[in-house]
Amino acid sequence: MMLVPQGMAYALLAGLPPIAGLYASTVPMVVYAFFGSSRHLSVGPAAIVSLLTFTGLSAIAEPESGEYLGLALLLALMAGAMQLGLGLLRGATLLIGVEEGLMLGVLFALLAFVHRSARPQITELGYSRENDAFLDVRRRGVVTHPRVLIARFEAPLYFANANYLSQWISARIKERPETRYVVVSCRAVSDIDATAIGTLESMVFACRERGMEILFSGMNPSVREKIERAGWPTRLGDMARFATTREALESLALLKEMRHPPSKRTDS
């Protein structure tokens, strides 16, 4: 019975709908009952597999999207085909004596994941008139506005990395004293915990004390629901109502200034 809630939790950890965790909890046990070789072997989803799945696929597609789900299914089929092939070819004999190396590999992979999740990718965005989109400022032809900082956070927000976002924004503001608005794109933020919500609140108050306003765009429904339960609309205003970064900038009447003409050009 414990495997059912565990499977649902592991599915959310991997950026998948909970129903995927239910299938991963029940179907393998039914199949293994007919084809398995040990009645003592535990069969089902694992936390490390969920974390590695999210790390690999979130860089390709947006979590919880149809494309992301399709890639997860393809990954599962590929892993299953490899395991089946090794089993039919008795490939396990090639792995005799490498248990210690595998354990070290898993350990270092887990440490690397923890490091990346604690210091995830944060990209400063600018406006590309050629593509009519917001892209990395390091790309050719992307322009920025001296009064607005646009940042895209590319990981779930939780206790280990929320301060990193706050520090990153503070450092950029010091480099750009003319900044009056900060727009944080949260499209890649699939989850948020209470500690991260508290850190973001402190960041909002700190910005307002310095005469700046901070807005959040692209929050998915589950993240938005959590900040609403935390009382953001009442205490801080509906600063996370924007569906896109474009909508947030239009509310600030800055998008036209970025289009005609650009105040800063990055050609690197």
Image (cartoon, rainbow, N blue to C red):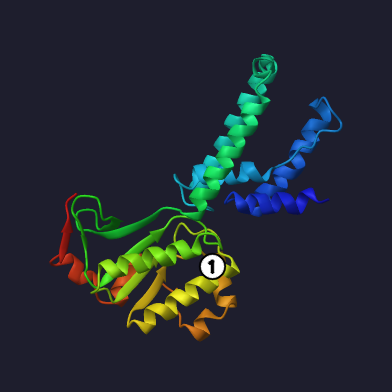
Closest to the observer, 103 or 261:
103
Q: From the viewer's perspective, is 133 left or right of 35?
A: left
Closest to the observer, 226 or 242:
226
The image position of residue 134, as x and y in percent, is 29, 58
At a point 26% along the width and 55% down the height, the residue shown is 137
Residue 179 visible (yes or no): yes
Residue 244 visible (yes or no): no
At a point 38% along the width and 78% down the height, the residue shown is 207
Closest to the observer, 214 or 168:
168
Q: Quadrant of residue 150?
A: bottom left
Q: Quadrant of residue 184?
A: bottom left
Q: From the viewer's perspective, is 246 left or right of 89?
A: left
Q: Please rate how many residues cluster around mark 1, counting C-alpha atoms within 10 Å: few if below 14, some from 14 to 19, many from 20.
A: many
Q: Is residue 124 above or below residue 89?
A: below
Per the image, label 1 sits on a secondary structure element best described as: helix
The image position of residue 53, as x and y in percent, is 56, 43
Which residue occupies the extreme bottom position in the image? 234
Residue under label 1: 196
Q: Is residue 236 above or below residue 164?
A: below
Identified by mark 1, the residue type is Ala
